[in-house]
Image (tube, grey):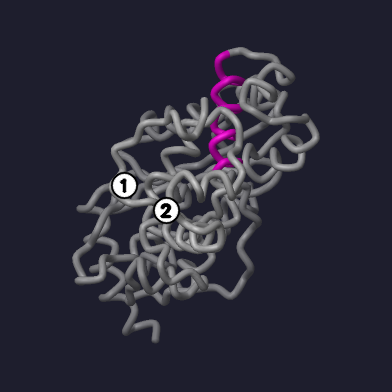
C-alpha cells in the first residue's frame, strides 16, 4: 500500500503520520513519510517522538512486532510470521524478541510452552492480589475479585506454560514482593532489601516510564506531564498515560500515583475505586513513615 493511497481522517500531520505507519505493510522511510504529511523529516521526528514516546521508525517496529505476535498466536510458523509481519530478516526479530516477547519466538508461538510460572495470592482491602514470577523475575502483580479471575488473566499471557500456585513463604522472590506490598499498604515497616528482577515485555519507553513511577514517594502524586518531563520527553504526556495503562505490576510500580494535570485521578487499570483507596491509604500512612 502506498503512503499516498492511504486515507486518513486525522486532523494534524503527526496523527496522519501515525495512521500512515499503521496502515503500511512495510516500514516507511522517514523522508517519504515526512513528504506525505507536509513536514520536514527532522520536524516530524521531533514531534512524533514528543507525542508518542517513540520515533516513527521505532513505532513502525512496534507495529510489526504486534503483527508478528498475532501471526504466531494464529499458528503461523516462526519463519512465516517474520515475513508476514514485514521483517526483512529473522535476525532483527531475534534481537528484539527477548524484551518484547519475554521468551523466544518459538516459545511464544507455543503460548509459553516449556516455561514455568509460579504464583501466590494475598487478600487485601483492594481485593485479591496475585504475584507471579518466571525463572527470570516477577512477571505480574494483578488485582481482582478472586484467585480464579486472576489466574485466568495470568493464563491469557502464558496459555501453554506450567502455572503453579506456591506458598510465598517458600519462594524468595514472591516473599519479597509480598513484603513490599505489605509495607506500601502500611501493614509493616519498609525494608531496604533489593527487589527481585522483573520479567516484563516492554519497550524502552515503557521501561523509562515505569522506572520514573518507582521514584514517586508514597503519599505524593505526579501528573502525566511531570513524568514526561522527568524522562526527558516533556511533550509525551499521552504516551506516558498509555505506558501507565499497560503496567502489569500493581502497587510496586505505582501507576496509581499518576494523575491528570488538573489533579483529577485520570485512569487506572484496576479501577478508579481502587486508585482512590490506594492514594487515601498512602496519604494516611506516609506521615507516620516519614
Q: Position of residue 154 (x, y in %)?
A: 48, 33
Q: Is residue 109 left or right of residue 242?
A: right
Looking at the image, do the residues carrying marks 2 and 1 touch, with CB atoms under 8 Å apart?
yes
Q: Is residue 9 left or right of residue 141?
A: left
The segment highlighted magenta reads 60-74
List the single residue furthest toward the right: 91
Q: Is residue 45 left or right of residue 186?
A: right
Real-space Cα distance between discs 2 and 1? Answer: 8 Å
Q: Which residue is mark 1?
A: 270
Badge 2: residue crowd in 10 Å (few <14, some 14–19, many ≥20): many
Which residue is drawn at the image coordinates 40% and 46% (left, top)?
129
Q: Position of residue 105 (x, y in %)?
A: 70, 28
Q: Is residue 49 left or right of residue 217?
A: right
Q: Position of residue 211 (x, y in %)?
A: 54, 65
Which residue is drawn at the image coordinates 45% and 43% (left, top)?
130
Q: From what the image shows, is residue 90 above or below residue 277?
A: above
List the single residue furthest toward the bottom: 290
Q: Within the image, what quadrant is residue 5 found in?
A: top left
Q: How many marks?
A: 2
Between residue 136 and residue 216, name the one nearer to us.
216
Q: Earlier in the sequence, mark 2 or mark 1?
A: 2
Q: Which residue is mark 2?
A: 250
Badge 1: residue crowd in 10 Å (few <14, some 14–19, many ≥20): some
Is residue 269 something that shows in the picture?
A: yes
Amino acid at each position: 500500500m502506498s503512503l499516498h493511497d492511504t486515507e486518513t481522517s486525522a486532523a494534524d500531520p503527526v496523527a496522519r503520520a501515525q495512521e500512515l505507519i499503521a496502515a503500511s505493510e512495510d516500514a516507511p522511510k522517514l523522508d517519504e513519510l515526512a513528504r506525505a504529511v507536509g513536514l520536514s523529516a527532522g520536524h516530524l521526528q521531533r514531534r512524533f517522538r514528543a507525542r508518542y514516546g517513540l520515533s516513527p521508525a521505532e513505532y513502525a517496529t512496534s507495529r510489526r512486532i504486534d503483527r508478528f505476535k498475532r501471526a504466531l498466536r494464529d499458528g503461523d510458523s516462526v519463519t512465516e510470521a517474520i515475513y508476514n509481519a514485514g521483517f526483512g530478516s529473522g535476525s532483527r526479530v531475534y534481537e528484539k524478541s527477548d524484551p518484547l516477547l519475554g521468551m523466544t519466538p518459538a516459545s511464544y508461538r507455543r503460548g509459553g510452552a516449556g516455561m514455568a510460572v509460579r504464583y501466590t495470592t494475598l487478600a487485601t482491602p483492594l481485593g485479591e492480589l496475585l504475584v507471579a514470577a518466571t525463572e527470570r523475575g516477577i512477571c505480574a502483580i494483578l488485582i481482582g475479585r478472586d484467585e480464579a479471575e486472576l489466574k485466568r488473566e495470568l493464563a491469557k499471557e502464558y496459555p501453554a506454560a506450567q502455572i503453579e500456585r506456591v506458598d510465598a513463604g517458600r519462594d524468595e522472590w514472591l516473599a519479597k514482593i509480598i513484603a513490599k506490598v505489605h509495607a506500601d499498604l502500611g501493614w509493616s515497616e519498609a525494608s531496604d532489601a533489593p527487589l527481585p528482577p522483573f520479567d516484563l515485555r516492554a519497550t524502552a519507553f515503557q521501561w523509562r516510564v515505569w522506572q520514573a513511577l518507582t521514584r514517586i514517594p508514597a503519599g505524593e502524586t505526579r501528573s502525566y506531564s511531570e513524568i514526561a518531563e522527568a524522562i526527558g520527553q516533556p511533550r509525551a504526556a499521552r504516551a506516558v498515560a498509555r505506558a501507565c495503562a499497560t503496567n502489569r505490576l500493581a502497587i510496586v510500580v505505582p501507576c496509581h500515583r499518576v494523575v491528570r494535570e488538573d489533579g483529577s485521578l485520570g485512569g487506572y487499570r484496576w479501577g478508579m475505586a481502587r486508585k482512590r483507596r490506594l492514594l487515601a491509604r498512602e496519604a494516611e500512612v506516609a506521615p507516620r513513615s516519614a
